[in-house]
Image (cartoon, rainbow, N blue to C red):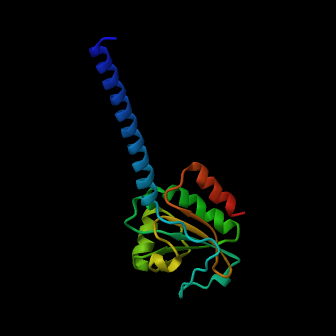
């Protein structure tokens, strides 16, 4: 091999190695940034204490933790229009909890055409929620049985509906 051919081969190998390292670094950064942007899941089995909610009024309660400024909440409205009646049909109490005043929460849900039998104002921290939308299925002691965080895809929506039975 000539000197130029050897140099070309080395340069090509270095370029391939650099491209591989760049792709690996981008993949790793997306993985870590994506998981850093995901809000932590509520702790299953932990008790939700909220002064204005008596969990023992029902065997199970579905909490919709939403916020009027949450575009994922608005984008999920069609699912909530199906979810709330399904929960009620299964004897599950439904409460929407928003950090905004109750009147604003009711107006927001009305605008989305989402039926909400009960609307409460509370900080989301008080109900073990760090991101919206979050759905919590609670037992009669207010312990979290199941939790779903974020905008759900079709498969996750089916899991939620199945979890109501």
Taking 79 as reference, is 98 left or right? left
Which residue ends up furthest to the top in the rendered image? 1
Q: How many marks?
A: 0
- 46 and 79: which one is in front? 46
On the image, the x and y values in percent for residue 118 come to 54, 77
On the image, the x and y values in percent for residue 51 come to 53, 88
Taking 136 as reference, is 112 left or right? left
Q: Image quadrant for the C terminus?
A: bottom right
Query: As displayed, is residue 29 above or below residue 87?
Result: above
Q: Residue at x 52, y 75 (%)?
A: 128
On the image, the x and y values in percent for residue 121 come to 45, 80
Which residue ends up furthest to the left in the rendered image? 4
Query: As displayed, is residue 128 above or below residue 28?
Result: below
- 25 and 54: which one is in front? 25
Taking 86 as reference, is 125 left or right? left
Q: Residue at x 46, y 75 (%)?
A: 124
Q: Residue at x 61, y 80 (%)?
A: 47
Q: Image quadrant for the N terminus?
A: top left
On the image, the x and y values in percent for residue 67 come to 42, 69
């Amino acid at each position: 091999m000539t000197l130029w051919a050897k140099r070309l081969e080395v340069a090509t190998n270095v370029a391939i190695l650099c491209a591989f390292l760049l792709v690996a670094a981008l993949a790793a950064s997306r993985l870590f940034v994506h998981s850093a942007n995901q809000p932590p899941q509520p702790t299953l089995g932990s008790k939700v204490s909220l002064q204005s909610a008596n969990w023992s009024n029902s065997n199970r309660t579905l909490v919709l933790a939403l916020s009027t400024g949450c575009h994922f909440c608005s984008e999920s409205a069609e699912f909530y229009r199906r979810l709330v009646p399904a929960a009620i049909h299964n004897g599950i109490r439904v409460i929407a909890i928003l950090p905004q005043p109750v009147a604003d929460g009711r107006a927001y849900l009305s605008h989305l055409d989402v039926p909400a039998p009960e609307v409460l104002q509370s900080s989301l921290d008080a109900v073990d929620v760090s991101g919206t939308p979050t759905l919590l299925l609670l037992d009669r002691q207010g312990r979290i049985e199941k939790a779903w965080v974020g905008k759900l895809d079709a498969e996750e929506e089916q899991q939620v509906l199945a979890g109501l039975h």
